[in-house]
Amino acid sequence: MEYQSVPQSEQYRYEKAQVDSSLLGDAQKNFAKKVFSIVGFQLMATSLVAYGAMSFKFIETLCEILYIPAVIATIVTGIWLYLSKSSARKFPLNYILLSVFTLSEAIALAITCAQISDPELIFQAFLITTGIVVALATYAMTTKNDLSYHGAAIFLFSFGCCIAGITYFIFRSSFAYQIYLIGGAIMLGFYLVYDIQLIIGDKQLRLTVDDYILGSIMIYTDIIKIFIRVLKILMKEKKEK
């Protein structure tokens, strides 16, 4: 399945770094730690739900029943948090919406994993995704290159991947599908580096310290999408053997 992209609200997600240089100190570091901690809990919860659906039939059945409501909840809460700055910053509403969003994504991912007959593929995708995320996160935190100022270029690359996807669905071209999968994985890698740099805040653009929920959703959805794309690539390779 393909996950719905959460809208990017470019106007208020970040601001010029020079507006408040104090955020580049301890406050920004604490903000980054908070975001990554929340993402860690999100990924842990998602993994538990997915494992449960793969291991226990009644959990898989429950996820199947909740699948449509989960997809709707993902879209609604995602749009709500991205378009309503006050909701994304108001405690405890922001955590409630984030919890609903995460649980809904977890249910959708659990259904995807439970329908795959070979658990080894899922484990391989998990290891590959972990390696990719660690490598890209290290790069984002250490490089002098500023991807936070190249959102338009990343968007154009994304548009190219969408065209490849549309071409595949119309003409059923295996080559277009390969470009769609691999190009999409590369694009998502760029987005992950881009979003991490917005959170770290040492480049031209950054998130404000009040936007920890938005930052968490950005990183979480990047990682989930990378995992899904890697899993699809592995499934395609296995099918062709």
Image (cartoon, rainbow, N blue to C red):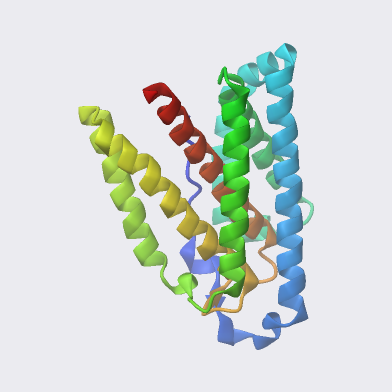
Between 63 and 12, the one nearer to me in the picture: 63
Rendered view: 11 above or below 110: below
The x and y percentages for residue 70 are 61, 29
Image position of 204 (left or right of 88): left
Q: Is residue 57 visible?
A: yes
The x and y percentages for residue 113 are 60, 26
Count of marks placed on residues:
0
The x and y percentages for residue 30 are 77, 71
Give the farthest residue toward the front.
241
Q: Which residue sits at x=75%, y=77%? A: 27
Q: Is residue 90 visible?
A: no
Q: Quadrant of the C terminus?
A: top left
Rendered view: 128 above or below 144: above
Q: Which residue sits at x=49%, y=55%? A: 189
Residue 224 placement: quadrant: top right
Q: Which residue sits at x=72%, y=27%? A: 51
Image position of 33 (left or right of 71): right
Between 18 and 72, the one nearer to me in the picture: 18
The x and y percentages for residue 59 are 73, 18
Give the farthest residue toward the left.
171
Rendered view: 110 above or below 21: above
